[in-house]
Amino acid sequence: MLGAKNPYTSRNGWMTSFLDPVGLVCLRISAEDRESVIASGGAAVMQYGRNMPDFVSLPEGLSDADLDQLFARSWDHAGGLEPK
């Protein structure tokens, strides 16, 4: 999907991933996964002056297998949230 400025994916009404204005890939993932991604070089996400606590930007250089796994975990996480 294409938002007002950023392409994104969603499940059950929840945004699961998006590309930020500078091209960083950002994912909605569990708190445990966020800690792991941040420890490996990812970062918390701020958009339009506010913290997006469920999201993390992915570090550069992840393998295709790591990206696939993180996107799958993000999709599963969003699937466990109450539909909007």
Image (tube, helix red, strand yellow):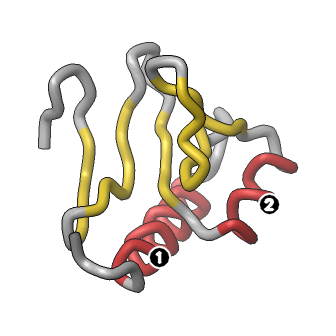
Measuring 45% from the left and 19% from the top, which residue is drawn there? Answer: 48
Image-based side of 44 in relation to 67, left or right? right
User: Element at badge 1?
Assistant: helix
Residue 51, percent from left and from top? 59, 35
Measuring 68% from the left and 38% from the top, which residue is drawn there? Answer: 44
Q: Can you identify the residue that label 1 sits on?
A: 77
Say which amino acid is labelled 2: Ser
Say which amino acid is labelled 1: His
Q: Can you identify the residue that label 2 sits on?
A: 36
Measuring 45% from the left and 14% from the top, which residue is drawn there? Answer: 22
Measuring 49% from the left and 42% from the top, which residue is drawn there? Answer: 26
Which marked residue is nearer to the observer: mark 2 or mark 1? Answer: 1
Residue 75, percent from left and from top? 38, 71
Q: Residues within 10 Å of mark 1 (few under 14, many from 20)?
A: some
Using the image as rendered, state which of residue 54 and residue 20 is in the foreground.
54
Which image quadrant for residue 45? top right
